[in-house]
Image: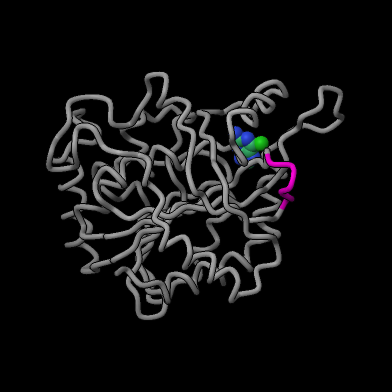
Amino acid sequence: AGTEENSYERADAIARYLLERTGRRPELAVVLGSGLGGLGDSLTDRQVLPYAEIPGFPTSTVAGHQGNLIFGKAGDRDVVLMQGRFHAYEGYSVHQVTLPMRVFHLMGVRAVLLTNAAGGLNRDYAVGDVMLIRDHLNLPGLVGCNPLRGPNDERLGPRFPSTSDVYDKRMRDQLAEAFKQCNFPGATRLGVYVYQQGPCYESVAECRMLITMGADAVGMSTVPEAVVAHHAGLRVCAFSLITNMALLEWDSAEKANHEEVLQTGQLRADQLKSSVSHFLANFSLD
Ligand code: 6GU
């Protein structure tokens, strides 16, 4: 797409800078969601680049979100990891939010794992479960805020890309296997993630609406990146840590809050770290 913020030229300049500066050739990129940034520690042979040191890259701001690009190894595999992502609710344009996917593609990365913290809508789910994303509802995308809006640059992907096949089944199955092998203590679910821009958590009526639309979990990220990565031909896999249950009763004494989201991230940090490391070291791209 043709805005200056995520143009081929900008993404390509950043990709070249990173390849030159690090000498690394990662095959896989990982984006760490709220409270999951600690996964960055699990890599070996690490090289940490703060976003602020990368010319042309946006910088990140929210409490609980760090801002580093980490190059390193998981087993024998070279990976690059975003510790902290850009969200539309912070004021970044949807083009800035998705720029890193184009950078990864132009660096030669072939697959991306996107992670997030999400609210559980499906009443079978519990706090601390993981939901592998099978499909999404891109609410802002449907009503005029699609990350691919604008002139299309064919070097980055087609004008009218499909989205019926964004989430790669083979990667997802391998990820499920990694959670199983590592005895992840929560259930591993398969479901539909609905993206709403935030920063407000949903009202009770909104949660009820989202359930009738077919969503199992709700969050404020991932879908723009997934769409742009898929557009560029990257293989995409994504999961949500269910950090809290969305509230469906009007007179509930509870309410959604960021502390609970971060606490559940903490609670599951070590187990997520081992499952994701296992996946990164063992998954196969063919
Ligand atoms: Cl309940 N809603 C949204 N939109 N994002 C979340 C969440 C809920 N819990 C964690 N992230």
Can residue 100 be seen here?
no
Q: Position of residue 227 (x, y in %)?
A: 35, 40
Q: Position of residue 231 (x, y in %)?
A: 27, 42
Q: Position of residue 253 (x, y in %)?
A: 87, 30
Q: 143 or 254: nearer the eye?
A: 143
Q: 190 or 90: nearer the eye?
A: 190
Q: Quadrant of ligand 1?
A: top right
Seen at 21% across and 62% down, the residue is: 21
Q: In the rendered view, would you say 130 is above or below 44?
A: above
Q: Quadrant of the C terminus?
A: bottom left
- Protein image colouring: one colour
Stretch in magenta = 122-127
Q: Image quadrant of residue 188?
A: bottom right
Would residue 119 appear left or right of 153 to someone viewing this image?
right
Q: In the rendered view, would you say 174 is above or below 149?
A: below
Which secondary structure type mostly characterizes the magenta part of the structure? loop
Q: Image quadrant of residue 68?
A: bottom left
Q: Quadrant of the N terminus?
A: top left
Q: Image quadrant of residue 10?
A: top left
Q: Position of residue 233 (x, y in %)?
A: 25, 50
Would residue 155 appear left or right of 35 to someone viewing this image?
left
Count of numbered labels shown in the rendering: 0
Q: In the rendered view, would you say 98 is above or below 20?
A: above
Q: Please check the rendered image and state whether residue 26 is part of the magenta-colored stretch, yes or no.
A: no
Can residue 80 be seen here?
yes
Q: Please check the rendered image and state whether residue 126 is part of the magenta-colored stretch, yes or no.
A: yes
Seen at 27% across and 25% down, the residue is: 149
Seen at 44% across and 72% down, the residue is: 43
